[in-house]
Amino acid sequence: MRFLSFAVLATFAMVSAQKVIPVQVGGNPGSPGGVTVFSPSQISANNNDIISFQFSGVPGNHSVTQSSFLNPCEPLDKGFDSGWVSVPQNLSSVPEWNVTITNDTAPIWFYCKQLLSKTDPVKPHCNLGMVGVINIEKGQKSFSDFLASASAAPTVGQAEGAFVGVGASATGAPSLPSGAAYFGGSAAAGDSGNGATPTSPGAPPASSTPAGSGFANKASSGVVLLATLFGIVVAM
Ligand SMILES: *[C@@H]1O[C@H](CO)[C@@H](O)[C@H](O)[C@H]1NC(C)=O
Ligand SMILES: *[C@@H]1O[C@H](CO)[C@@H](O)[C@H](O)[C@H]1NC(C)=O
Ligand SMILES: *[C@@H]1O[C@H](CO)[C@@H](O)[C@H](O)[C@H]1NC(C)=O
Ligand SMILES: *[C@@H]1O[C@H](CO)[C@@H](O)[C@H](O)[C@H]1NC(C)=O
Ligand SMILES: [Cu+2]
């Protein structure tokens, strides 16, 4: 009995340590920052935390694509990529893409790949400032420098990435309520998915295990093991 309570308590402690951090992808016309934003654009997260990207800017057609500080508007080699999610008005629920942090020791930069905009002249979203970063405090770079180099980027990379990225990974494509449309991304990429096999949302990554994920898994089993030992000692 006591053993059970300790195991259950420890499990709760473990689960509550995982944060779910919502980030809005795209603003609504007229909202502060306009349409071409991630909000918030700077996020702090620990291993195993979930960044829950909400494609709630309507109407919108955006992606969440990993890049780098040096090339803010180009896909990072082996980086994550949601694919484009097009969201009309009046959707019953919001498309959502969960990305789990697997390595929180370095900043994770990202942008939106969309080239189409309502600006005149038409400008890619990345040039309009649709960029973001996770754990910027783990590096020495400033967000304003990142933004400046994004707005000046001569090209905006369109290559398809995978759901598994560097330091953060999703297990599948964004959820798509009826009415939302999906363009590209790993699911449609075929040969360019960096070896990641798309799986349904919620399923564990199929083939490629993200580099950092072993840590979180080991840490979790460590807690359970400790709780088990502790429980046994108390039970005696
Ligand atoms: C969404 O963006 C993608 C990529 O630019 C494009 O192929 C697609 O036609 C767009 N969909 C809509 C509904 O605008
Ligand atoms: C959204 O719903 C409102 C009210 O039902 C309607 O007037 C409007 O035309 C709809 N917009 C779109 C884009 O379907
Ligand atoms: C994202 O993660 C949250 C928290 O675990 C969960 O409630 C939600 O259903 C997930 N969404 C998707 C699309 O998997
Ligand atoms: C995490 O990222 C850092 C910085 O990029 C890297 O040096 C380290 O090897 C990574 N750790 C794992 C477990 O992949
Ligand atoms: Cu965008």
Image (tube, grey):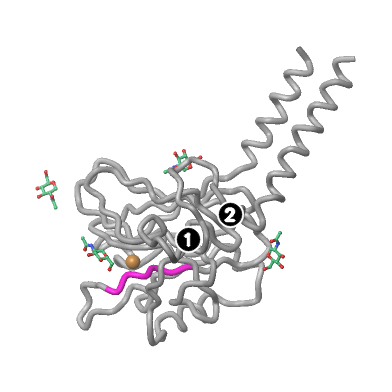
Query: Mark 2 and 1 residues: CB-CB less than 8 Å, in contact?
Result: yes
User: Is residue 113 in the magenta section?
Assistant: yes
Q: Which residue is mark 2?
A: 208
Residue at the spot 27% in from the left edge and 57% down from the top edge: 86
Image point (65%, 30%), residue name: 12
Q: Quadrant of ligand 4?
A: bottom right
Magenta-tinted stretch: 110-115
Question: What predominant SS class does the magenta segment belong to?
Answer: loop
Q: Does 71 sit above or below residue 221?
A: below
Q: How many marks?
A: 2
Three-letter amino acid code of the residue under disc 1: Ala
Query: Relative to residue 129, is residue 66 drawn left or right?
Result: right
**Figure check: 188 above or below 216:** below
Q: Is residue 123 magenta?
A: no
**Label located before the other in sequence (2 or 1):** 1
Residue at 65% from the left image edge and 66% from the top image edge: 106
Q: Can residue 33 be seen? A: no
Judging by the rendered image, the residue that carries numbered circle 1 is 162
Secondary structure type for disc 2? loop
On the rendered structure, is 12 left or right of 184? right
Q: Position of residue 78 (x, y in %)?
A: 54, 67
Rendering coords of residue 150 (x, y %): 43, 80
Name the image quarter holding the C terminus: top right
Q: Residues within 10 Å of mark 2 (few under 14, many from 20)?
A: few
Tag in front: 2 or 1: 2
Which residue is drawn at the image coordinates 25% and 56% (left, top)?
58
